[in-house]
Amino acid sequence: MTPSGTTSGGATDPAGQPAWELLLPAAGAPARRRGRALQEALREAVRSGRLAAGTRLPSTRELAADLGVSRGLVTEAYEQLTAEGYLRGERGAGTWVGGAVRAPGGSGGGAGGTAGADGRGADGRGVRGPVAGVSGPEPGVRVDFRPGTPDLSLFPRSAWAAAQRSVLARLPHRALGYPDPRGLPELREVLAGMLARRRGVVADPERLVVCSGVAQASTLLGFVLRARGLREVGVEDPGSPEHGRLFASTGMETVWLPLDGEGLRPEPLAASGVRAVVVTPSHQFPSGIGWSAGRRAALLDWARTVDGYVLEDDYDGDFRYDRAPVGALQGLDPERVVYAGSVSKSLAPGLRLGWTLVPGELLGEIVERKRTMDLGNPVLDQAVLAEFVTRGGYDRQLRRCQRAYRERRDALLAALAEHLPGTGVSGIAAGLHVIARVPARFGPPDRFLARAAGAGVALRSLEEYGTARPADGDVRLVIGYAHLAPSAIAEGIGLLAGAVG
Amino acid sequence: MTPSGTTSGGATDPAGQPAWELLLPAAGAPARRRGRALQEALREAVRSGRLAAGTRLPSTRELAADLGVSRGLVTEAYEQLTAEGYLRGERGAGTWVGGAVRAPGGSGGGAGGTAGADGRGADGRGVRGPVAGVSGPEPGVRVDFRPGTPDLSLFPRSAWAAAQRSVLARLPHRALGYPDPRGLPELREVLAGMLARRRGVVADPERLVVCSGVAQASTLLGFVLRARGLREVGVEDPGSPEHGRLFASTGMETVWLPLDGEGLRPEPLAASGVRAVVVTPSHQFPSGIGWSAGRRAALLDWARTVDGYVLEDDYDGDFRYDRAPVGALQGLDPERVVYAGSVSKSLAPGLRLGWTLVPGELLGEIVERKRTMDLGNPVLDQAVLAEFVTRGGYDRQLRRCQRAYRERRDALLAALAEHLPGTGVSGIAAGLHVIARVPARFGPPDRFLARAAGAGVALRSLEEYGTARPADGDVRLVIGYAHLAPSAIAEGIGLLAGAVG
């Protein structure tokens, strides 16, 4: 236990021991809020350097006793922060502060906090997550399992209309003028708070740029990195081909980097020579894995070593069904990670409204690029979203979608078990899609897909998302379920089974 | 009189003479509508080739008698189309069909109509018109005459709110999905109709791309032309420096091209070697001239000769106070002119909503570039604008602004005459700004501007918009008046006179 400093309120007592009780500011609050407060306080202590890398944490039993909380609450906090890469643990041996975190503007465990134009070279890139063009019914398609679209009927029209009315009634005239290319100040404040709370990011409103979605965040970053001399971006294999297309529009070529069950494999990444990658660590698209804490830390180590950048496409980080979502990678090193998200999965892609959190080193160039692309996002929409989040509408919407999507995921798994027995579903219980591996006896894959199409079932094969061509004969599918009612899911899998059985 | 063909409804009688009465489809309508119908019919006849270049038109007296309309109505139509470059006339000698017009998809006088992917080389560019960042009050500024912003208090909040409600009530769910990058089909239809009617453009909805304003239209075009190998764009001198900045973001350098009182001077343009220019022919920014018909025709000749493109920034073409606005250049050759406009001056810049009409040759590249930039404009805003235009709100708004801005222009001219006698105001009675030339006795210019600033009067000097540095000692100002109430205008000019007198 070697606390690194006593700045910023000093979580250290006179004997040099961390004053653990300072981790629990809301001691009188209900358990759920206390659990979240503990996690947030731990994260902040690690980030600020008050808990330095290598610091050994008390056992869950000890800390629970110190804080007067249940042991389960501490265990959950340790597990959550271990998954996020702030802590590392070995079964039976204890829990330490990990070495992955890097404070904003600093290069080590310092107190940090200011923007860091510290002269580091450059790179990094970003590209759009899973964008599917499923916007309307297609002839011959009875059930469309292609991923990428939320249930558009869940869009909260009444609450949105109320926010629109309120905004038009209160917005000062001058707000209708040419916008700040970074976004409406009130929205940046509100989003920074929401993202810090929900996604565990380091969200300085001054580093948040409102943009039209992850796609634009990717293009903005691509142009900036290309202007700094980078020519290639690494993307996950399997991954979204859209990432590569967006970067290609900025003059950057794509290098596929292989994944395994934990995340990007470190050796091929190191050997690739790229200095920028686009990743989906919270819920990898399309494989559905959550990156391990080790791979999250290794990626950040790599970025620091090569003076590189990571674009974190947090395309569906709001949707996890079995536990709290893993915090974003950006929280570990906001100077190396460009974070990007949007309302496309939580509200509607048609709103074209998203955000990116940008390292200080790149901020000025990203903002100027945003300015020349469109002068900034439409003002009324931004004010409406700020109003909607502030009124609690966004949290309500996420809860509503969570319930609906979890139910649909369950319906899909049940239908697969009933109609295509032996099918394995991989990936964490999260997001808007699953990977299904249908046994070879229903194949071979080409015939399977052709028969599915013939039966009016639109599907995407995992092979469309990368370079792997497994020869085991199993049929690997990327199945989107969020936009389909449970009855449509059951119908679709039934049609599929009838066609291939 | 040599009619070139008898296609498309044949405005030619059996003796080979144009059947002039076909020019007046709405013979029973009120005079104002009949005048507009005559102009539209004449334009269409020239565009389609039914009236070939060189065709001599009947005298105004003859045609008025043939059509049973007043001679003034015919005279007005001839003048209007001459100003737009469709016709050319010599005093006392008659009126001919000009050679400037080129039908869409064709290279001469053919009937045209289809998109022309006819393999022409490439270039052209575009850049944002007058963009000022006047979004809020600045310390020490009492009256701000800097141009570029409309009166934001004229934004029609109630009508906009009504359109928002209506859209949220009726829009089908699937419209909330990922948008068509070209724009919402219903908006493209509505805008094409509105622009054809108001601005005399050839507006095929299939060639109209909704974008976030003239700035984005410029950047889109810049990227497309740069990818085709162009490296330079010509801009008007004086002109908006923003044009050059936007093109610079796409990798294109700016070449200043001198204007005179009629438009771009042909010789320096020809000698420059550029193959793309950005122009503001309807109301040149900042000089305030309207390009002459001769220069409009000469520019199109140049574009055809060098296989080049023209970006027409129609930033304030809706506002003309002494006569009907001159039709857009694009109407003369939609295969060489990229037309761009927006609601920034008519509604609010904060909406970030505009349009570009694109030659068939460039359309696919522009749309793909729009897709990678942002996947398309926000859907709800597009639907609201479509609703607003369809309900007549847009025309009402333009009439409202016209009245207000004409009154403010008059107030400015009166205040200048009273407080700074001898000041000359140049340019047509149009738009949101004037050029004022204050006599040297109030100068010299540097002292004049310093004293104005000291008195809290924010001004822009014409020298900020180009390379000219006249040595006559007069003070040349670009004065924006549209965003100021008449009382503020009078107060500002009074303050100014007090400071420099």
Image: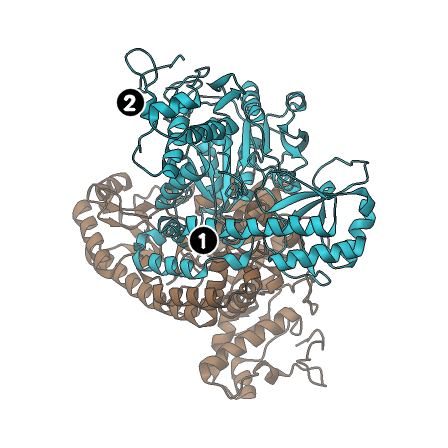
Chain colours: A cyan, B brown
Q: Circle 2 — which element?
A: loop
**Residue type pointed to by label 1:** Arg
Quadrant showing the N terminus of chain B: bottom right
Q: How far across and down, in percent of the image, does residue A327 sit?
A: 48, 34
Crowd band around label 2 with a 10 angstrom C-alpha radius: few (<14), some (14–19), many (20+):
few
**Residue A115 sits above or below residue B12 on the image:** above
**Horizontal side, residue B480 vs residue B175: left or right:** left
**Residue A144 sits above or below residue B52 on the image:** above
Closest to the observer, A195 or B146: A195
**Residue A34 sits above or below residue A54 on the image:** below
Q: To which residue does mark 1 refer?
A: B352
Q: Residue furthest top?
A: A15
Q: How far across and down, in percent of the image, does residue A249 sit?
A: 62, 41
Q: Circle 1 — which element?
A: loop
**Residue at (37% x, 19% y) in the render:** A50
**Residue at (66% x, 74% y) in the render:** B50
Q: Depth-wise, is mark 2 or mark 1 nearer the camera?
A: 2
| Res. A3 visible in picture | yes
Location of residue A283 (image quadrant): top right
**Residue at (24% x, 61% y) in the render:** B486
* Chain ID of residue with mark 1: B
- As drawn, the label of residue B436 is none
Closest to the observer, B42 or A402: A402
* Chain ID of residue with mark 2: A
Disc 2 and disc 1 in contact, CB within 8 angstroms: no
Closest to the observer, A98 or B315: A98
Q: How far across and down, in percent of the image, does residue A464 sit?
A: 72, 43
- As drawn, the label of residue A9 is 2
| Res. B254 visible in picture | no
**Residue type pointed to by label 2:** Gly
Q: Compute the Cα span from label 2 to label 1.
A: 45 Å
